[in-house]
Amino acid sequence: MTDHDLSIVVEGLRKKYGAKQALDGLDLAVRTGTVHAVLGPNGAGKTTAVRILATLLRPDKGRVEVAGLDARARSREVRSRIGLLGQHAAVDEKLSGRQNLEMFGRLYRLGARGARARAQELLDRFGLADTGTKAVEQYSGGMRRRLDLAASLIAAPGVLFLDEPTTGLDPRGRTEVWNSVRSLVDGGTTVLLTTQYLEEADQLADRISVIDHGKVIADGTADELKASTGGDRIDVVLRDPAQLARAALLVPGDPVIDADRRMVSAAVGDRIIALTETVRALSDNGIDAEDIAIRRPTLDEVFLHLTKEHAA
Ligand SMILES: Nc1ncnc2c1ncn2[C@@H]1O[C@H](COP(=O)(O)OP(=O)(O)OP(=O)(O)O)[C@@H](O)[C@H]1O
Ligand SMILES: [Mg+2]
């Protein structure tokens, strides 16, 4: 892969706020036309990275290239090729969705007619045409976020930055935004999104960079990350929750109890051996299982594993 195929390149990015090292040698490479998730907990440096990429903040050190351009030296040109959906929205509450989009269009010098046409196109695309005259303060969370997304696309950017696009949304709002992002990517836009939701990265991203304390601690596809924690897990669901503690002593590995789901779960090496041993041990001890399943780890488990490993 050459840099030519990459819409975003970040190397050794560093940024300090006073004594706080927010970015500590961050590296990223995002292929053109793909979705890349930057996944990390509160304070990991996600917004700082996005603001630097969007040329709103200057880094202390490091290489930043967006759409083939040095983002530090050619910030104006970079700005004309990107869209940004900030963590906190920039739309005007009192105006309607249509008015907001037309206003953004005029800011981008599309002209009155151009701005009107672009607003209509985006309202249609994000399923907001019917609500186009309602003030934004009356929108649901999902509708607002879709409007934010529409606003970030006014200038038809090739590269789009989404900083926690679904934080605070209910599952339905989240699904709406996900579908909107998917349709963008089908149209060829390169997307870098930040998220604290593993499921979001799993759903949307071609590749994921897990960051903590301002640097990447793991990256790959969701599948690669899941495989990297040492493979499969076994879930044993019991009929009688009173037997959970005893079952936990019998399941191989280092099991955890999930009382709400009447479940004991553990990482396993060889799946067949683990399954056979578990079935035998439970039956020898008179413990009745409702379900036993071998499965791959969830990204949540991967994330916990990685951040624990990184802290150690
Ligand atoms: N303007 C600022 N002045 C001082 N410290 C800051 C500033 N902005 C961010 N920080 C600190 O830098 C670190 C990274 O912050 P950043 O906002 O990039 O994290 P984040 O991953 O976006 O977090 P969140 O998930 O909460 O949005 C945090 O420790 C934060 O407190
Ligand atoms: Mg943030």
Image (cartoon, helix red, strand yellow):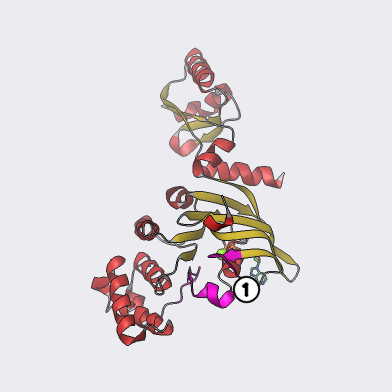
Left or right placement of residue 76 versus residue 83 in this view: right
* Residue furthest right in the image: 19
Asked whether the viewer can see residue 93, the reply is no
Asked whether the viewer can see residue 266, the reply is yes
The image quadrant of residue 256 is top right
Residue drawn at (49%, 53%), measured in percent from left and top?
Answer: 197
Question: In which of the image's four quarters is ligand 1 placed?
Answer: bottom right
Q: Is residue 185 above or below residue 17?
A: above
Q: Is residue 2 above or below residue 223?
A: below
Name the spot of residue 178 as percent of width and height, x first. Answer: 38, 57
Quick one: label 1, few (<14), some, or many (20+) residues within 10 Å?
some
Left or right placement of residue 137 versus residue 16 in this view: left
The image quadrant of residue 120 is bottom left
Left or right placement of residue 210 versus residue 150 in this view: right
Residue drawn at (38%, 81%), measured in percent from left and top?
Answer: 105
Residue drawn at (44%, 69%), measured in percent from left and top?
Answer: 157
Residue beneath label 1, please?
57
Label count reads 1
For residue 147: magenta? no
Name the spot of residue 195 as percent of width and height, x first. Answer: 51, 57
* Residue furthest bottom in the image: 112
* Residue furthest left in the image: 130
Q: Which is more toward the observer, 216 or 141?
A: 216
Secondary structure state at the residue bearing disc 1: loop
Residue bounds of the magenta highlight: 65-90
Name the spot of residue 219 as percent of width and height, x first. Answer: 58, 47
